[in-house]
Image: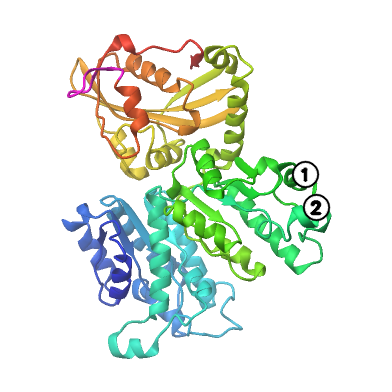
Amino acid sequence: MVEPLLRLLAAPCPPPVVYARITPFNQVRQTLAGMAGADQLSRAETLMVWTTPQGSIPAFLKIQEFEPFDLNEVLDEVDQLAGMIRRVAGRVGTVLVLSWATPPYRRWVQAMTLRHEKGLANILMRMNLRLAEALDKSHNVILLDCQYWYASLQKPAYDGKLQALAKVAYSRDFFMKAAAEIKAVLRGVRGEARKLVICDLDNTLWGGVIGEDGSEHLRLGGHDGVGESHAAFQRELRMLRKRGVLLALCSKNDSDTAWEAIDQHPEMVLRRKDFASARINWNDKAENIAQIVKELNLLPKSVVFLDDHPAERDRVRQAFPDILTPDLPVDVADYPAFLASLHCFETVNITDEDMARTDSYLNESERRASVSASGSVQEWLASLEITLNVSRLDRGNLIRATQLLNKTNQFNMATRRMDQEELWRWCSLPGHQTWVFSVADRLGDSGITGLISAESLDGQDARLTDFLMSCRVMGKQIEEAMLHFANEALAARLHVAFRKTERNQPFLEFIQTKWIDEKSGLLDPARMFRPQHVKIQ
């Protein structure tokens, strides 16, 4: 029984619409078959499939109860179940499937449990791997690691009394853990993950106060427990950076002294190139954070602030309630595990653009710095040698296109949110076309940073349904080149389906200069031009 989980998912605010149905024991296949025709399913955003191995794979019972079994029969039943999940997945936005795990109280025979093709744990691993393989091509199906929930809980996951009285096999602590993990995944699906970590320096990235102790006396790495904890904390931050989370510094310090330590200290894990922005001075930290957020074109709700000083944390919480400002553990030895356990960085996929994001922002800083060396903005733009590469949407770029669709807010015409399969189905409809745009210049390649989708209305008219572009390439008239391309490719009177949100004012300011008629969204072809400094190919 999972009713406690559904109540926790609904608090403190409603999650996406979840289709829930409690399945009688050994009735999983019958329930999934019934779901294929359920009217309620078409209105659900999320379907969660949580089964036990013995309740969904009948042959698994033989292994658990020490009866003769056929491994091929077990895996065939896994394939059958996966096929039913795939069919149901075609009617819902996102499907969460929980992996199989034995109850934490069940020991089985430890000397045998991992024995090849015979032990309970060994077979269960094979079942989970088979399930993952069978569901891999269904891009809206996410397989969650239930075994991790058991291992990380550090509290009893099973409540024998609840099982006896109410047939509830899990403890409240376990349901709370499950709800937190599921909500984190759903936030990642909706593109609501945090994108930037702003860090203090003294007693946060390193031990000690550099202005007083000097670089040579900082506690960082070496054979010192405190120093090694700070180095491990930096390694966790570096892993976040490598998967696309931006890092920034905000510290009350002498800038030259701090940068010297960052650049030259032999035990520093993070270096200057790892930070997309920095404010190292004696100014108010809230003011510095405001500048960083503006510089990186992000919103406060995309930011995490880490600082060991309670007063500084309090100042930032009051100034920016939407910034996540957690209390760091009292013991620095707990810093790495604390950071690794945060739920706010969840993502469905990690793309090449994610892994190169910090480099892109650093290149953008170099571009902005080069403006002052040019006689005018147009001379600067011409000097960048910008190339806009256009491609049709295909399976190879679908992951990045979906990510852009769900994460872009400021320069986004319609702010539609869809998962991969929903986007692919929409784009495959007759009369629908979708292009993705990659931007490169002499300072670097920003990757896929734009998308336009369109639908034909009749022989003379077409409508742009989606028009979005990453804020990382704003300010170079890339949007003008994208619109010019769409106008040329569609060869029809263009309309736009603009939908105002709290965040897409930048797009409104762009598109309202192109309207002939705001009500119908009709655009003036005379105002759609190709910037001379942008090469389209």
**Disc 1 packing (10 Å; few <14; some 14–19; many ≥20):** few
157 on left or right of 208: left
* Point 47% across, 65% down: residue: 145
Do the numbered discs 2 and 1 sit on residues whose CB atoms are within 8 Å? yes
Quadrant position of residue 62: bottom left
Residue 515 in magenta?
yes
In percent of the image, x 35 and y 23: which residue is there?
A: 510
Horizontally, residue 156 falls left or right of residue 228, namely left
Does the image show residue 79? no
In magenta, the rendered stretch is 513-522
Give the percent coordinates (x, y) of residue 265.
80, 50
Q: Position of residue 342 (x, y in %)?
A: 51, 61
* Lateral position of residue 322 relative to residue 165, left or right: right
Q: Secondary structure at mark 2?
A: helix
Residue 89: x %, y % from top left: 30, 53
- Residue carrying label 2: 215
Q: How many marks?
A: 2
Neighbourhood count class around disc 2 (C-alpha, 10 Å): few under 14, some 14–19, many 20 upward = some
Query: Is 437 above or below relative to 147?
Result: above
Q: In this view of the protein, can residue 6 be seen by the observer? A: yes
SS for dot 1: helix
Q: Which residue is mark 1?
A: 260
> Which amino acid lies under the numbered mark 2 shown in the image of this protein?
Ser
Q: Earlier in the sequence, mark 2 or mark 1?
A: 2
Q: What's the CA distance linking mark 2 and mark 1?
A: 8 Å
